[in-house]
């Protein structure tokens, strides 16, 4: 077990510089990022409440509120006489936006891309097929608008990324299955880095066609065609990102 009382603010609870709404949110950010980074192992206790107050320069009220937030995210378990201990990652709420963001911050790019593509391949083709069956007129308008924003982005990488994220999020909303919605919300955060890498490539004209194929299949209410179009898009996206990353690495060497 690590001696968590010896952890210092400089080495463990580093301020990530994230924008937060309030003081206890800022403290939760710092502690949460430390937990996800592995500075305190699962099963180990957080420093005592008094020690945390000293390290963070805040009151006990702020610490307690921050810890309550981390309990809600599944990162820690707090019990009388036992203290507050880090839970095994299997119990973390990985769909929580903060937890996801912290995982992205501390995960190497290779692992991050691999896991994101695994999740996309497992969910996105079926989400597209379901959207083709369940989407209503409002969904069709939103998807068409998001796709047009991708076309209008032209060479503007930032605008392309935002439009691309919106398009894929709208697919999950169009399933009208609330169990798919958190995945779409997750991708709003988790795919940003992936899409930012992909935006640097020269494949955009082909990607526009592939997204149009997905859209057309959903609008035509053809689930099998939507599923096939999504699989094609994902297969080429994997190859595109691998090629772009290799080119960037070569340019930097």
Image: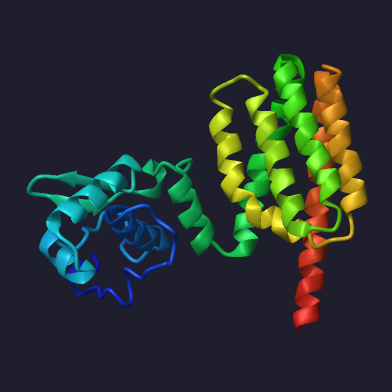
Residue depicted at 77% across the width and 51% down the height: 160
Residue 126, compared with residue 235, is above or below; it is above
x and y percentages locating residue 225 in the rendered image: 86, 24
Tell me the residue at 62%/19% (across/down): 176
Q: Nearer the viewer, residue 86 or 208?
A: 208
In front: 163, or 78? 163
Against 111, residue 171 (above or below) is above
Indicate the position of residue 18 as horizontal and vertical percent values: 44, 61
Residue 208: percent from left, percent from top = 88, 44
Q: Quadrant of residue 58?
A: bottom left
Instruction: Give left or right: position of 7 versus 244.
Output: left
Residue 3 in sight: no
In this rendering, is residue 249 above or below 165? below
Residue 5 shows in this picture: yes
Foreground residue among 181 and 74: 181
Image quadrant in which the N terminus is located: bottom left
Q: How many marks?
A: 0
Q: Position of residue 189 (x, y in %)?
A: 57, 48
Please tell me in which quadrant of the rendered image residue 5 appears. bottom left
Colouring method of the image: rainbow
Residue 148 versus residue 243 in the image, above or below: above
Looking at the rendered image, the quarter that the C terminus falls into is bottom right
Q: Is residue 204 left or right of residue 145?
A: right
- Furthest toward the left, the residue is 81
Task: Give the residue at x 77% y 20%.
Answer: 132
């Amino acid at each position: 077990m690590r001696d968590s009382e010896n952890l210092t603010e400089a080495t463990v609870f580093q301020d990530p510089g994230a924008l937060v709404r309030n003081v206890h949110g800022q403290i939760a950010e710092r502690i949460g990022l430390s937990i996800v980074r592995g500075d305190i192992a699962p099963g180990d206790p957080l420093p005592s409440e008094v020690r945390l107050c000293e390290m963070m320069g805040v009151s006990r009220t702020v610490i307690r509120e921050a810890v309550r937030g981390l309990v809600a995210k599944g990162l820690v378990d707090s019990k009388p006489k036992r203290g507050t201990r880090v839970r095994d990652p299997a119990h973390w709420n990985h769909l929580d936006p903060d937890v996801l963001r912290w995982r992205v911050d501390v995960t190497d790019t290779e692992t991050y891309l691999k896991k994101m593509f695994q999740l996309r391949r497992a969910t996105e083709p079926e989400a597209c097929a379901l959207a083709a069956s369940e989407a209503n007129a409002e969904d069709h308008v939103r998807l068409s608008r998001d796709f047009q924003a991708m076309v209008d982005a032209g060479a503007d990488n930032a605008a392309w990324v935002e439009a691309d994220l919106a398009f894929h999020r709208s697919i999950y909303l169009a399933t009208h299955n609330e169990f798919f919605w958190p995945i779409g919300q997750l991708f709003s955060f988790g795919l940003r880095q992936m899409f930012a890498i992909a935006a640097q490539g020269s494949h955009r004209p082909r990607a526009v066609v592939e997204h149009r194929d997905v859209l057309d299949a959903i609008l035509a209410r053809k689930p099998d065609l939507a599923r096939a179009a999504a699989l094609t898009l994902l297969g080429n996206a994997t190859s595109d990102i691998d090629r772009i990353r290799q080119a960037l690495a070569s340019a930097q060497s």
